[in-house]
Image (cartoon, rainbow, N blue to C red):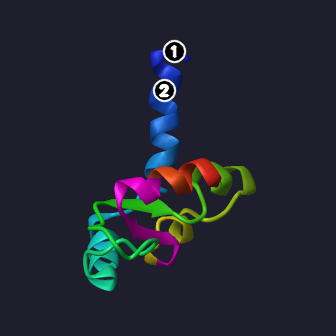
Amino acid sequence: MGAQARKEKRERRADYEFSGSVKNTVTQRSGGTCEECESYRASEFHHKVSIATAIMMGWEASFVASADNCLHVCSYCHAVLDVTA
């Protein structure tokens, strides 16, 4: 994939990324604890419906980037969720 193609892919995905406001809302909801295992400090944000799936299905970016589609997770759970998605 060339540099231009990577740039275009990044730009397409930008609307689907979580905003600072959404991250703050989700952090307050989780209390800073992983919402998957509830054992570790959460430091990452996971899309329940992945950006790739949302783009393929033609879903609205506003849902995909919302707090309802976001999990606050530890790095271990994030890796597991990404592999099993």
Residue 70 on the magenta span: yes
Boundaries of the magenta span? 68-78
Instruction: State the SS at label 2.
Output: helix
**Label 2 – label 1 distance at C-alpha:** 6 Å
Kindly check if marks 2 and 1 are in contact, taking CB atoms under 8 A apart as contact. yes
Which residue is drawn at the image coordinates 41% and 75% (left, top)?
35
Residue that numbered label 1 is attached to: 2
The residue carrying mark 2 is 6
* Relative to 54, 45 lies left or right: left
Label 1 Cα neighbours within 10 Å, binned few <14 / some 14-19 / many ≥20: few
Q: Is residue 45 left or right of residue 5?
A: left
Q: Amino acid at mark 1?
A: Gly
What residue is rendered at 46% in x and 40% in y? 11
Residue 73 is situated, as x and y percent measured from the top left of the image, at: 38, 65
57 in the magenta segment: no
Q: Give percent across and percent down for residue 33.
A: 30, 75
> Residue 24 vs residue 66: left or right?
left
Q: Is residue 12 above or below residue 67?
A: above
Q: Secondary structure at mark 1?
A: loop
Q: Position of residue 23 (x, y in %)?
A: 31, 69
- In this orientation, which residue lies closer to the viewer: 44 or 56? 44
When asked about the image quadrant of residue 26, the answer is bottom left
Residue type pointed to by label 2: Arg
45 vs 14: above or below: below
Q: With respect to residue 25, does 79 lie above or below?
A: above
For the C terminus, which image quadrant? bottom right
Q: Residue furthest top?
A: 2
- Residue found 43% across the figure and 49% down from its top: 14
Residue, far front: 39
At label 2, counting other C-alpha atoms closer than 10 Å, the crowd grade (few under 14, some 14-19, many 20 or more) is few
Residue depicted at x 50% and y 46%: 13
In the displayed structure, 68 sits above or below 46; it is: below
